[in-house]
Image (tube, coloured by chain):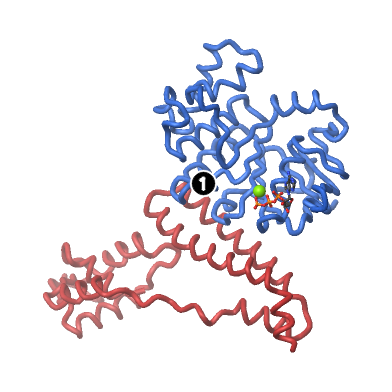
Amino acid sequence: MNGTTTPLLAGTGLRKTYGATPALVDATICVRAGEVLAVMGPSGSGKSTLLHCLAGIVAPDAGRIVYDGRELTAMSDRERSALRRREFGFVFQFGQLVPELTCLENVALPLRLDGLKRREAERRAAGWLDRLEVADVADKRPGEVSGGQGQRVAVARALVHQPRVVFADEPTGALDSLNGERVMRLLTRATREAGAAVVLVTHETRVAAYSDREIVVRDGTSHDAELVA
Amino acid sequence: MSIGQAFLGLLESHPRHGYDLKRAYDERFGQDRPLHYGQVYATLSRLLKNGLVEVDSIEPGEGPERKCYAITAAGVTDVERWLANPEKPDLYLQNTLYTKVVIALLTGRGAAEILDTQRAEHLRLMRDLTRRKTDGDLADQLICDYGLFHLEADLRWLELTAARLDELTREVRS
Ligand SMILES: Nc1ncnc2c1ncn2[C@@H]1O[C@H](COP(=O)(O)OP(=O)(O)OP(=O)(O)O)[C@@H](O)[C@H]1O
Ligand SMILES: [Mg+2]
């Protein structure tokens, strides 16, 4: 990465306190279009809080977040949730698929919510299941597939509406190494092909090794060398 | 790396010339470090002297590369013994990183930066190996994973040491 392109998403001076617990003290982070950024650091250092702030899920107490020239921190809740639905994708450690829907319906859901007709939504969803090498579980429910398959379905769902940023918080945390690597290989291949950026929270270095760059969060503090102009 | 036993293993299916052995070895086990011809012929002459290989045929001409080598019964026994015996695990107790950290603390310098710089360097190499693994076949994957798991172990040590730096500073400077 060179320092000449402006970042797609940047947070500066972020602070967030829960009661008496300082989760973020002074966090700075940026990610460029198409970049896979690993966010590392010890447990409790504030990685997930930082990801939630950047994604507009949690409002920081102080600091600024700018996405594609727009200030996230100044948007209304409605604008922010529309942005999240259209331009962001999410993968978490587990529990993100709707248990009553089939895997295909789960992946089609973001498109349906955006008003796309069922047939077209499911056609595109099937394509993503195929790319994530889980076409065979399309008609099963999440409870009927393995952890690794479920996680690849979740990745398909995070990518189906072609987001510009994918937020992944410990996406391989519940998987063994072989399945974790498979998820990482397919996730990064798919986002690189689509030109989407990834903010990847992980404490596993072998997972972080799939990134282009890393930042480290310690005691709620992070510095991003790319932002020091 | 036990070049001798690997040679014997490669000779077990059929006799080979020295250059053919080198090529087979480099292809499977050489990775970034192909054998020198000197190593190849030194290894072969040792195996020959110990009766583990014999010269199967000699083509007319000059130079060591005319000889074709075959494994002997003693050679087969040697490969079997080598495979059956576990390798001695490395102890890893001598380590430059630990020495650097302690020297930094003893001389009143910061050790946190040393650890941070090292982790970035380790992660850089892990990225290279990961890329190579992703583009490669199963053999590449297994070889790169071996390196990746060892680098990961180093990184865990770096992380743990970073978390204990205050304690270590007190101990070293007292
Ligand atoms: N919703 C919340 N309410 C209260 N405290 C919270 C909340 N979320 C996070 N915290 C606290 O903020 C700090 C940072 O938490 P965070 O979840 O961001 O850490 P993390 O780096 O993601 O840790 P881990 O690697 O264990 O997931 C912790 O002390 C945590 O207990
Ligand atoms: Mg977390």
* Circle 1 SS class: loop
Left or right side of B141 for B4: left
Name the quadrant containing residue B142: bottom left
Neighbour tally class for label 1: few under 14, some 14-19, many 20 plus, Cα within 10 Å: some
Q: Residue at x 58, y 56 (%)?
A: A205
Colour of chain A as rendered:
blue
Left or right side of B68 for B123: right
Residue B111 x/y as whole percent: 72, 75
Q: Amino acid at mark 1?
A: Ala
Q: Nearer the viewer, residue A87 or A68?
A: A87
Name the quadrant containing residue B145: bottom left
Q: Residue at x 59, y 79 (%)?
A: B96
Task: Say above or below: B142 vs A191.
Answer: below
Task: Say above or below: B19 vs A79.
Answer: below
Which residue is tagged 1? A174
Q: Residue at x 59, y 65 (%)?
A: B155
Left or right side of A9 for A99: left
Q: Nearer the viewer, residue B168 or A223?
A: B168
Residue B2 visible in the displayed image? yes
Residue B14 x/y as whole percent: 16, 63
Residue A1 x/y as whole percent: 70, 48
Task: Say above or below: A120 vs A219.
Answer: above
Task: Say above or below: A19 vs B86.
Answer: above
Colour of chain B as rendered:
red
What subunit carries mark 1? A
